[in-house]
Image (spheres, coloured by chain):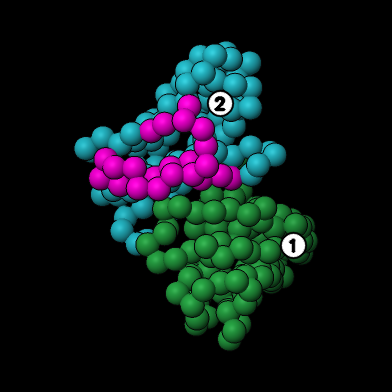
Chain colours: A cyan, B green
């Protein structure tokens, strides 16, 4: 069974640009969550989608957004990139009330 | 979700048991204790969870005190591959998709 797949693995963007990251959950998993990991703030919850609806949201500015498609694949978008957005972005999927499985992450560098 | 407190770092000799403590004095009666770990540059990995009773799986054992104010994750025979950051998380049923990570414990397993 394939795990959670995140693409791309690495990304370099310039300040002011926008970026879209993709996450393909484990087959059958309908919940997808996104996290940001930085050396200073650690692992922080961004948002969670279930059946194409945002169910939970963390404390991040509106520049961070996401969506989920009918096949449960999810994307997150960051607009007007800032240097502080440089981070490892992790996606996790789960089935019902079960543990979350994480992908390898997308490492975003903003220059 | 309960606030958890963990020591920032611990050492363990290879082959010995690693006992990682976690204080969660504000945990609610229906809040589970979850453990995840993150090996360098990888996504977090689920280890084990419990509510009241001690739990064991192929990876680890979880000992929860009777008053549920603290718990201990036990890796019975630590290997070098167990070197990672270990996170203890308090989580309500159904909240598996919104994980609030603390700073965790950095476990170093030495030869």
Do tags 2 and 1 sit on the same chain? no
Host chain of mark 1: B
Q: Is residue A3 above or below residue A8?
A: below
- Left or right: A77 in relation to B64: left
**Front position in the image: B12 or A35:** A35
Local secondary structure at mark 1: loop
Quadrant of the rendered image containing residue A40: top right
Distance, label 2 to label 1, CA atoms, is 30 Å
* Residue B19: x %, y % from top left: 69, 71
Q: Does the magenta stretch include residue A60?
A: yes
Quadrant of the rendered image containing residue B111: bottom right
Quadrant of the rendered image containing residue B108: bottom right
- Left or right: A26 in relation to B86: left
Q: Give the range drawn in magenta.
A: A43-66
* Residue A2: x %, y % from top left: 35, 44
Q: What residue is pinned by disc 1?
A: B7
Q: What residue is pinned by disc 2?
A: A108
- Left or right: A1 in relation to B4: left
Query: Is the residue marked by circle 1 packed among few (<14), some (14-19), or many (20+) residues within 10 Å?
Result: some
Residue B59 seen: no
**Front position in the image: A28 or A43:** A43
What residue sits 38% from the left and 33% below the top?
A: A66
């Amino acid at each position: 069974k394939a795990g959670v797949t995140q693409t791309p693995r690495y990304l370099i963007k310039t300040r002011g640009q926008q970026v879209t990251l993709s996450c393909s959950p484990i087959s059958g998993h309908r919940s997808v969550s996104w996290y940001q990991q930085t050396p200073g703030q650690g692992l922080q919850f961004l948002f969670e989608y279930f059946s194409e609806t945002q169910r939970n949201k963390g404390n991040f500015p509106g520049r961070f957004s996401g969506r989920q498609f009918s096949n449960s694949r999810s994307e997150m978008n960051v607009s007007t990139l800032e240097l502080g957005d440089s981070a490892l972005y992790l996606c996790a999927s789960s089935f019902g009330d079960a543990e979350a499985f994480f992908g390898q992450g997308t490492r975003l560098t903003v220059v | 979700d309960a606030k958890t407190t963990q020591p920032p770092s611990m050492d363990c000799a290879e082959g010995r048991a690693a006992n990682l403590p976690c204080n969660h004095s504000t945990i609610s009666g229906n809040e589970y204790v979850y453990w995840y770990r993150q090996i360098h540059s990888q996504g977090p990995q689920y280890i084990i969870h419990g509510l009241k009773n001690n739990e064991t799986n192929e990876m680890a054992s979880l000992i929860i005190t009777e008053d549920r104010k603290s718990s201990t994750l036990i890796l019975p025979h630590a290997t070098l591959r167990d070197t990672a950051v270990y996170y203890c998380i308090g989580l309500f049923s159904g909240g598996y998709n919104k994980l609030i990570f603390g700073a965790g414990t950095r476990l170093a397993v030495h030869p």
